[in-house]
Amino acid sequence: MDHTERIIRNFVMYKTNMYADNIDKEVEILIRLSLEIENSYSMDCLINDMSEEHLYDIIKALVSDNNMNWGRIVILFVLAAKIAQHHVNNKERMENIICLLNSSPSQWIKTSGGGWNTFILQFDNTKKGLLKSLFNCMLYYCCKIVNGLIVL
C-alpha cells in the first residue's frame, strides 16, 4: 500500500468510525477540514442518493477539465467519506470508494500536486473563506452529476 492509499484508507476509516492504522499529519488535516466543511454546510441532502457511481462521475468531471487542485482533492475526500458513511455496513462498497479515490486523484497528487508535503503546507492553517469556495465547488459538481446535467 502506497502513502496516498494509506491516507485515503485511514481518512475514510476514521470518518466511518472504524479503526484507522495511524493518523498521519495529512489525515489530521483532512479530518479538520472535513469537520469544518460539515459543520458549516449540510451535505446530507446531497449524499443520501449518491453512490460510488456518482462519485466516479464527479471524479471524472473534476479531472477532465484539467483544473485539478488540492481544494478539489479535499472536496473529493470529504464527499467520498460522506458516501462511505452511508455504506459503512457494506465492505465491498467501502473498498470501491477507497479504490476510486486512489485512481485519478492519486495520480494528480503524485505528479502535478507536488505530493503530500505540498498539501500540508497549503492546508495546515486554512482560512474559512477557502473552505466556503471549496464547498461551493463540490456543491456545483454534485448537483450537476446527481441531476444528470453533466454528460461524460
Image (cartoon, grey):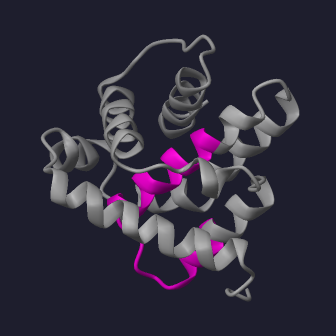
Q: Is residue 1 left or right of residue 50?
A: left
Q: Residue at x 62, y 58 (%)?
A: 46
Q: Compared to 90, does 82 lie above or below? A: below
Q: Residue at x 64, y 73 (%)?
A: 60
Specify the quadrant of the image occupied by residue 24.
top left
> Residue 32: where, in percent of width, then height?
31, 32
The residue range painted magenta reads 59-82
Q: Nearer the viewer, residue 28 or 33?
A: 33
Instruction: Look at the magenta stretch and give its main secondary structure.
Output: helix
Specify the quadrant of the image occupied by residue 99.
top right
Q: Nearer the viewer, residue 128 or 101?
A: 128
Please say whether residue 42 is visible from this viewpoint. yes
Q: Is residue 94 left or right of residue 101?
A: right
Residue 68 part of the magenta-drawn span: yes
Q: Count of labels shown?
A: 0
Residue 5 part of the magenta-drawn span: no
Please say whether residue 110 is visible from this viewpoint. no
Which corner quadrant holds the C terminus?
A: bottom right
Q: Is residue 125 left or right of residue 43?
A: left
Which corner quadrant holds the N terminus?
A: top right
Q: Residue at x 78, y 43 (%)?
A: 96
> Residue 117: where, in percent of width, then height?
25, 42
Q: Residue at x 59, y 62 (%)?
A: 104
> Residue 78: where, in percent of width, then height?
49, 45
Q: Compared to 59, does 88 lie above or below? A: above
Q: Compared to 86, does 63 lie above or below? A: below
> Residue 84: where, in percent of width, then height?
68, 37
